[in-house]
Image: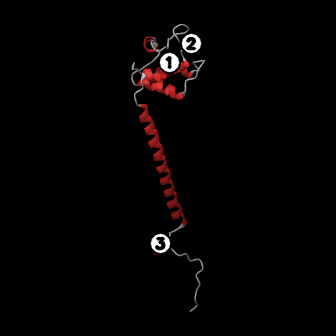
Amino acid sequence: MKEQKITNMKFYPFHHQPKNKLCNTISWGILLVLIAFSFNACYFDVVIAEELNEVEEISFSKNIVPVFQASCTSCHNGQVTSPDFTRTSAYAELINGNYISITNPETSTLITKIQSGHPYTGSVTDTEINRIVQWIKNGALNN
């Protein structure tokens, strides 16, 4: 009998040999997909946490009036242009002048005016706009 030499033999512990390369590739692919989904889950936890923060109560006097004072009262001060956004008049002007819509805050006159490039002298940030929208969604309370 002649002895045969086996040259392409690989050692797999516990006699576990992959059936073929395709099976091994699929296993690695599934593992990578599962890892990607686990990172995605962390991302959604952060987004949900940010949305929960938006539900916090926003005070008209502490959060909204300061935006008006910083960006609006140089013109909207009761003497030059309506509505009057001074501390004592702002709430009544917004409510009585129909500048806000509780049912559709994003299309309120106040919000559309700000988003269209108003005011001319100061800028209202996206965060401040979102805070005003959230205040309206919360019922536009005079608090």
Q: Which mark is residue 85?
A: none
x%, y% of residue 20? 53, 67
Q: Secondary structure at mark 1?
A: helix
- The answer to whether mark 1 and mark 2 are in CB contact below 8 A is no
Badge 1 or badge 2: first in the primary sequence: 2
x%, y% of residue 81? 54, 9
In this orientation, which residue lies closer to the viewer: 37 or 59? 59
Q: What residue do we see at 40% from left, 28% from top?
A: 57
Amino acid type of the residue tagged 3 in the rendering: His
Please count the marks in the image. 3
Q: Is residue 18 above or below residue 50?
A: below
Q: Is residue 28 above or below residue 41?
A: below
x%, y% of residue 134? 44, 26
Q: Secondary structure at mark 3?
A: loop
Amino acid type of the residue tagged 2 in the rendering: Cys
Q: Nearer the viewer, mark 1 or mark 2?
A: 2
**Label 3 crowding class (10 Å Cα cut-off): few <14, some 14-19, many 20+?**
few
Q: Which mark is residue 75?
A: 2
Which residue in the structure is indicated by mark 1? 110
Amino acid type of the residue tagged 1 in the rendering: Leu
**Label 1 crowding class (10 Å Cα cut-off): few <14, some 14-19, many 20+?**
many
Q: What residue do we see at 49% from left, 13% from top?
A: 86
Q: Is residue 5 above or below residue 129?
A: below
Which residue in the structure is indicated by mark 3? 16
CA gap, disc 2 and disc 3: 79 Å
